[in-house]
Image (cartoon, helix red, strand yellow):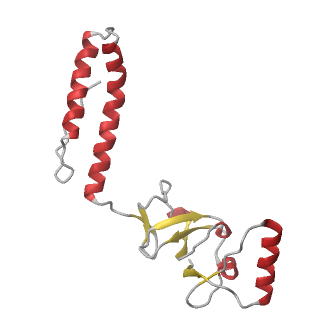
Amino acid sequence: MMIAGKFTKYTPTNEKLLEDAKFIKNNTGMDVVFLQTEQGDDWYEIQSMFSPDTIKIVYDENKVITSYSRDVSSLNPIDSFIAEVSEDDFPEDIDILGGWGFDGEKVVKINPDPLEENNRIKNQLISEATAVIAPLQDAADLSIATTEETESLYEWKKYRVLLSRVDPKKPNWPPKPTQ
């Protein structure tokens, strides 16, 4: 498995590369960005060294994955590193939202900050409660709520208030009402 980088922008001195970049700009309107490693490896030249049967990942200095693809030519590792991993070792639920990293050998889940995670859970539970409350509240507003719906509305509103009071530093989650 190949690992390369950190890639940074550079201006090549090779006349052929400069002519090719000018041709591309004139015919497509798109600039060509040249990247190389500190060792002088050009991004376009080393792409052929990556296996076509692996997943290529782009990750930053903090080892957080910012992009990935099977097709190495679709990646743009500006100020980043690139590595390839076996498709068998690549998580199906991966995303590029900051929750996944590369430990030098494999893709790993990054443990979120507990406070951020508790706030995320709290907001998710409040949203779920609000979704349950909305039709119950509509029935109550229209004076067509059954006794069971009125009781359920009370329980869900109480639950939502208790959730809003949860301290994410020391969460004590209230029990969810039954639907």
Can residue 2 be seen here? yes
| Residue 61 x %, y % | 44, 76
Which quadrant of the figure has residue 161? top left
- At horizontal 30% and vertical 14% (from top left) the residue drawn is 140
Q: Is residue 105 above or below residue 161?
A: below
Q: Is residue 108 left or right of residue 87?
A: left
Which quadrant of the figure has residue 172? top left
- At horizontal 43% and vertical 67% (from top left) the residue drawn is 101
| Residue 169 x %, y % | 19, 54
Q: Foreground residue, 90 or 133?
A: 133
Q: Is residue 91 left or right of residue 110?
A: right
Which image quarter holds the C terminus?
Answer: top left
- At horizontal 25% and vertical 10% (from top left) the residue drawn is 147
Q: Is residue 59 above or below residue 8?
A: above
Which image quarter holds the N terminus?
Answer: bottom right
Q: Is residue 55 left or right of residue 95?
A: right
Q: Is residue 174 above or below residue 69?
A: above
| Residue 28 x %, y % | 79, 66
Which quadrant of the figure has residue 154? top left
Q: Foreground residue, 32 or 171?
A: 32
